[in-house]
Image (cartoon, helix red, strand yellow):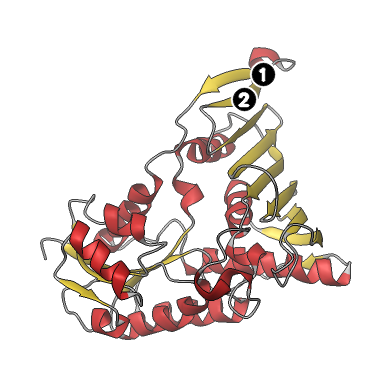
Amino acid sequence: MDQLGIAVIGLHMGYGHFRQANSHPGARLVAVCDINPAEVERVQAEFPVPLATTDYQEVLACPDVHIVSITTPDHYHLEQTLAAFEAGKHVLVEKPMARTVDECEQMVNAARKCNKKLMVAHVCRFYSFFQQCKQWTTDGTLGEIYHVETSYIHNYEEIPGHDGWRFDPEKRHFLIGGGCHAIDLARWLCGDVDEVSCYSNHYGIPVQQYDDHWIINCKFKSGAVGRILASDGCQRPYNIDCQVWGTLGTVEGDNTSDTFKLCLRHVDRHRWLTVPKETMAKAIANEIGHFVDCVINDTTPLIDGVDGAKTVATGWAAIESSRTGLPVKVRNEF
């Protein structure tokens, strides 16, 4: 085939996905879907596609669709991913991969059974600054990594989602659905988490039926330690940031500033270097392009189903730790 056909299911979170679907020369947007007819009409008016529907099963039945981007609310991910695999499609699913560890396991097993690609859209891995941090953890620039801190700070007071699904514990848990940004970033930079110890509280969003502020202390399998902060009721601007501490240097920065801080032992261990950077890279385009390349070349995505499941498992271990007041081991086998 000349190009892979991409379908986007869920046009609110998926707006960026559908806008970037044609950015790869090997792919083209062929279908869009949303339960809201007005959303379908709006997208179809902006960017006409062959198939625009409110029925995702119609999308899965289309032979021109090879890749499905699932950007619906968290509680639809399992059902729609399994249906897509059964229909013979490859799946790019928005983070979080699913609501629970059990749902993640079902998705991993289905991808294996159907021999299809599964990638979780953890977009932080495609921001240029975080990619630079990752490179420095592996090429020796920072030396041996012994500490990492990440945070996801976002006020959800005015974005409860359709019918308030973001505040409904049956449909979503914030630490899994939002805090997964910081969890996955820490895991990517420092490797699998072996054990967590977590504290949380509930001050920011009373209507939300679970805690809205979380601090996770992590022990990584590598021997490093770290801290992950996630907050969705805070009175602060949106931000995702990271700190990586190594024996030869330390880096601090985020996804919204136009500079980051770097301290290197061989330059001056007592002084920060202020380095310019992009405020926001074309992360979604890079994310989609990476998955298209994986399908074309039959390679493993950067965040496959197993990796996505580990991030969800780390989050649920933290929730259990906060509930019991005890350290909890993290499941890493899927």
Residue 300, horizontal then vertical, whole percent = 39, 61
Residue 109, horizontal then vertical, whole percent = 47, 81
Question: What is the secondary structure assignment of the residue under circle 2?
Answer: strand
Question: What is the secondary structure assignment of the residue under circle 1?
Answer: loop
The structure residue drawn at horizontal position 50% and vertical position 63%, both measured from the top left corner, is 95
The structure residue drawn at horizontal position 66% and vertical position 47%, both measured from the top left corner, is 151
Q: Which mark is residue 261?
A: 2
Does residue 8 appear in the picture of this structure? no
Residue 126, horizontal then vertical, whole percent = 44, 46
Going from N to C along the chain, the mark reached first, 2 or 1, is 2
The structure residue drawn at horizontal position 29% and vertical position 85%, both measured from the top left corner, is 57
- Pointer 1 residue: 272
Q: Nearer the viewer, residue 273 or 56?
A: 56
The structure residue drawn at horizontal position 10% and vertical position 61%, both measured from the top left corner, is 2
Does residue 256 appear in the picture of this structure? yes
Rate crowding at label 1 as few (under 14), some (14 to 19) or many (20 or more) other CA atoms within 10 Å. Answer: some
Would residue 283 be found to the left or right of residue 256 on screen?
A: left
Quarter of the view holding residue 316: bottom right
Task: Give, as a three-letter code, the residue at label 1.
Answer: Trp
Task: Give, as a three-letter code, the residue at label 2.
Answer: Lys
Q: Nearer the viewer, residue 112 or 153?
A: 153
Quarter of the view holding residue 160: bottom right
Q: Which mark is residue 241?
A: none
Q: Nearer the viewer, residue 132 or 98?
A: 98
Quarter of the view holding residue 204: bottom right
Rate crowding at label 2 as few (under 14), some (14 to 19) or many (20 or more) other CA atoms within 10 Å. Answer: some
Find out whether the residues at labels 2 and 1 contact each other: C-beta distance under 8 Å. Answer: yes
Q: Nearer the viewer, residue 236 or 288?
A: 236
